[in-house]
Amino acid sequence: MAKKTTRKKSTKRAATTKRKSSKKTGDMLLVGSKVKAALKSHGCNVSADALEGLNGWVHWLVEQAANRTAANGRKTVRNHDFLSM
């Protein structure tokens, strides 16, 4: 009688990330470690959702600057497009 060998099924899981992506804020435009370091240098703690909130605000600023640029008939976004709203 021949001995039957069986292989165990592989239990490898697909790599998953715990990164939350919000449709409202879109892709992350910030370097999280740099923002956290800047805030901590002022003696502040950083909550888990702080970067997401700041990222949403940056997206809004980019959208406003792009709209102002287009309204002025330009294709180049300049410094003052972010500052004067």
Image (cartoon, rainbow, N blue to C red):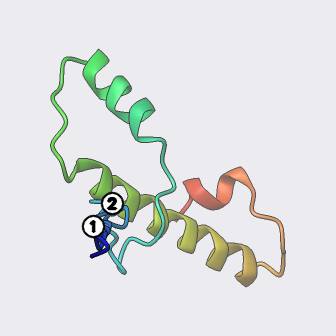
Q: Quadrant of the N terminus?
A: bottom left
Residue 84 sits in which quadrant?
bottom right
| x and y, in percent, of residue 9 in the image | 29, 71
Q: Amino acid at mark 2?
A: Thr
Label 2 vs label 1, nearer the camera: 1
Q: Residues within 10 Å of mark 1 (few under 14, many from 20)?
A: few
Q: Which residue is mark 2?
A: 17
- In the picture provided, is 42 more to the left or to the right than 63? left
Question: Residue 85, image x and y in percent?
Answer: 52, 65
- Crowding near pointer 2: few (<14 within 10 Å), some, many (20+)? few
Q: Secondary structure at mark 1?
A: loop
> For residue 36, which numbered disc appears in the image?
none
Q: Position of residue 60 (x, y in %)?
A: 45, 69
CA distance separating discs 2 and 1: 27 Å
Q: Residue at x 51, y 55 (%)?
A: 29
Q: Give the secondary structure at mark 2.
A: loop
Residue 53 spot, x, y in % from top left: 28, 58
In this figure, which residue is indicated by the disc labeled 1? 8
Q: Amino acid at mark 1?
A: Lys
Residue toward you, 34 or 61: 34
Q: Residue placed farthest to the front in the image?
A: 1
For residue 77, which quarter of the picture? bottom right
